[in-house]
Image: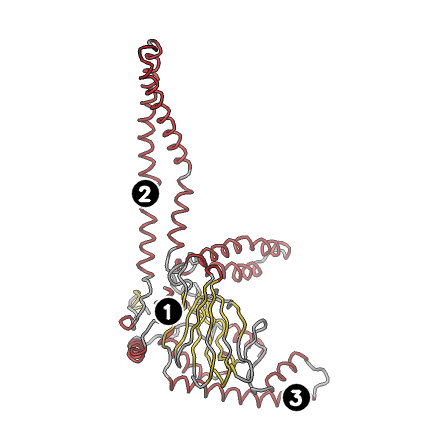
Amino acid sequence: MTQNGKVAPFAGEEFLAYIPPSHIRASRTIVASSVILFVIIFYVIPRYIKNQKQSTDTNVKENEETRKSFQENRKESEDVFHSSESEQNKETDMKELLELFFIFPKALYAILIFSLILFSPQNHETARRIFQSPMLRPHECKTIIEMAESVATRKYREAIATKNELENQYFKNMDDIHHIDKLLQWPEGWSKDRHGSYPTTDLNLATDFDQKSKRYIQTVLDARVSPLLERIYGITQEAIRADDMFLVRYDGNGQQHLARHRDGTIISINILLNGDFEGGGTKFFLTEQLQEDVARPRIGEGIIHNSVIEHEGLATTKGTRYILVGFLNVDRMDSRTGKSTNVGIFSTFFCFHWMSHFLSNRVPEFISTLNIHEFAKQILIDFSFVPKIISKQFNTVVDSLAPFGVVKLVQEDNYEKYLDALDRSYEANTRGSKDSSNWFEGNRNDLMHKGRK
């Protein structure tokens, strides 16, 4: 949250059991270090090399004169000559070494800057950790579940009516019929084919929930999730845009689990809404380090992680488990206003995960909008894989070096105090729509839904 153009302190800071790194301080350190290294490598060292080279040249010249003098009286000076010749060879080696170093300052500087970026918080400290924190109170979770069941009942009734209409049509759209049949299957009214590769039994918050319900959910997300994302990842709250917001149910006698996968955005959130089930949880994997960890949050607790981390939904063996899920992007331009979101370059262009996603998705989208020949477009799209591969290799390096595991941000006895502090901060700094996170308006499913109307 910003106040008068400055980032306000995180309201729940005093209740954090784990203190995330300060992204502002880290960014300033990297900039300052870059300037200092630039001065040392391109000014201090060259001046030192120049002085050493001049001194070496003078010594070589003096030794050459001495050598000639020694040659005139070799028998008398043989031992001294060998000593002088050895010194001359050392000085010549030093001269070649200094000249070699003088050739590669740019490469050295690039390596050092890359190292600074590699160990920045976005690529190291927070890159592969999974953060667990309270986000909703039990009564809020219950309200959202009741909303979801009401939506599912409405969708079921609508599906019956639509099914009857389709049966009376001469030309039938088989995709529509298949979708309706899925809605009519148990659990009735819940979508079961919305995510192609990894389908979930879910409801889309952007298209299925009414405005009143979405405002309720947005208020708690703006008050408690947006500030936490800003604190962990150093991103401005207005830069957060949900690509998909949905409510999932796992059932002991239905869809129990979700296979191992990666999400296709920048950040993922997952909030548990109930506790009357057995099993469940989310298992995370870091292949490069051969590590894994499991998050089993309490009611109202959520987990936040970079979407690139592999994970799977563990089986719910009895009862029904409800979770609210969000796939989030980080935008440099607000899709609602067209204005800058003021997110820093260290959270975007210098963040390897963000760059990988940008090159994989945004660059091809941008190329497709260019007013050039289709053949030229295709060539540009085909060659865009090169920087994509490079950025993925950077992510592999991060996988090898970054700390991994589930981190509990707040101790249980501080949950209520923590949530109260966030709520008070939100109420004291009522945010207008231009500054709030974009939870629903930039949702890809909402845009598709509007396009069909």
The answer to which of marks 1 and 2 sits earlier in the sequence is: 2
Q: Residues within 10 Å of mark 1 (few under 14, many from 20)?
A: some
**What residue do we see at 47% from left, 78% from top?**
280
Question: Which amino acid, by three-letter code, is at mark 1?
Answer: Val
Relative to 90, say whether 391 is above or below. below
Compared across the picture, whether 265 is left or right of 17 comes to right
Relative to 69, say whether 329 is above or below. below
The image quarter in which residue 47 lies? top left
* Element assignment for label 1: strand
Residue at the disc numbered 3: 165
Q: Which mark is residue 39?
A: 2
**What residue do we see at 49% from left, 89% from top?**
150
Q: Residues within 10 Å of mark 2 (few under 14, many from 20)?
A: few
Q: Toward the viewer: 226 or 186? A: 186
Question: Which amino acid, by three-letter code, is at mark 2?
Answer: Val
Compared across the picture, whether 85 is left or right of 264 comes to left
The image quarter in which residue 106 lies? top left
Spatial separation of the CA atoms under disc 3 and disc 2: 75 Å
Residue 231 image offset from top left, x and y in percent: 34, 67
**What residue do we see at 39% from left, 54% from top?**
117
Q: Which mark is residue 407?
A: 1
Q: Residues within 10 Å of mark 3 (few under 14, many from 20)?
A: few
**What residue do we see at 35% from left, 23% from top?**
86
Question: Which amino acid, by three-letter code, is at mark 3?
Answer: Glu
